Amino acid sequence: MQCSANLNQGGTGDKNQGCRKNRRAYHQDGEKKKDPEAIPILQYGPSNNFMKFKGAILKKALLDYGGLGKLIKQGYIVLPEQPDRETYGLDDDLDRLNKLDYLEDMKAYQKELADFHRDMSKLYALILQYLSIKTLDAVQKEAVWPVVEQDANPEALWQLVEMKHKVHSAKEVEAVGKLAARTQLAPTRQGSFNHCLQAKV
């Protein structure tokens, strides 16, 4: 080792000091540094790390899934807005340019809506991946869990996760009841989604 060689050859104090610095730097670099952007496993209980978890998974969701990732911040999914046919002046569109604009906007809308639908199961898996065993057990005890799991519904899953990390109170019971009602409407919402994709010009 070079440092030992310097000592044997009567190296100077400055060189020896440099060797000590190199050894300290080696030990520091040898330690695995924590990634500040890493998503922590969500712990369950009074001293949980929910806010840290939420901030980290929000960044990941927005980066990977765009507008769909806003679910983590808003607590619900806002679907893309469908172009309003009445605002394009199609009745007086002699050169049919307005119709072309409308068709292009509808095409972009349908693509964005399809992307939302495609990525929902991926966002569901992302949230599920970082739940601790205790958190998952608490979520699975809710009556709506079988439907949430079957549909791979990220919105319902996230709302359950948020509720289970609030202080236990009457508000949580009320929130669970509202979630159950919304989950029962899932087939209706799915039908509405399919209808949008099949919208005629």
Image (spheres, rainbow, N blue to C red):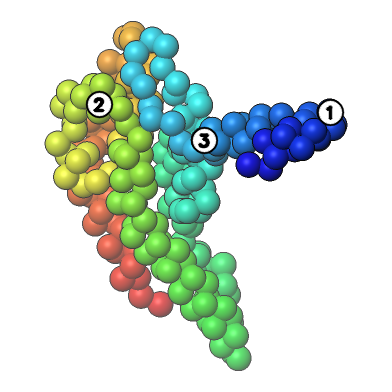
Q: Residues within 10 Å of mark 3 (few under 14, many from 20)?
A: few
* Residue 48 locus on image (x, y percent): 41, 17
The disc at residue 125 is none
Q: Is residue 107 above or below residue 144?
A: below
* Image vertical order of residue 153 relative to residue 143, above or below: below
In this view of the protein, which residue sits in the foreground, 14 or 145? 14
Q: Residues within 10 Å of mark 1 (few under 14, many from 20)?
A: few
Left or right: 126, with 60 as reference point: left
Q: Residue at x 55, y 36 (%)?
A: 30
In space, the residues marked 3 and 2 are separated at their CA atoms by 25 Å
Mark 1 lies on residue: 13
Labels 1 and 2 touching (C-beta < 8 A): no
Residue contact at pointers 3 and 2, CB within 8 angstroms: no
Quadrant position of the N terminus in the picture: top right
From the viewer's perspective, tell me whether residue 158 is left or right of residue 6.
left
Look at mark 2 in the image and give the residue it sits on: 133
Which picture quadrant has residue 45? top left
Is 190 in front, or is 161?
161
The residue under the point 47% across, 46% down is 61
Secondary structure under the numbered disc 3 in the rendered image: loop
User: Which residue is labeled 3 in the image?
Assistant: 32
Residue 177 in sight: no
Q: Amino acid at mark 3?
A: Lys
Badge 1 or badge 2: first in the primary sequence: 1
Looking at the rendering, which quadrant does residue 195 occupy? Answer: bottom left
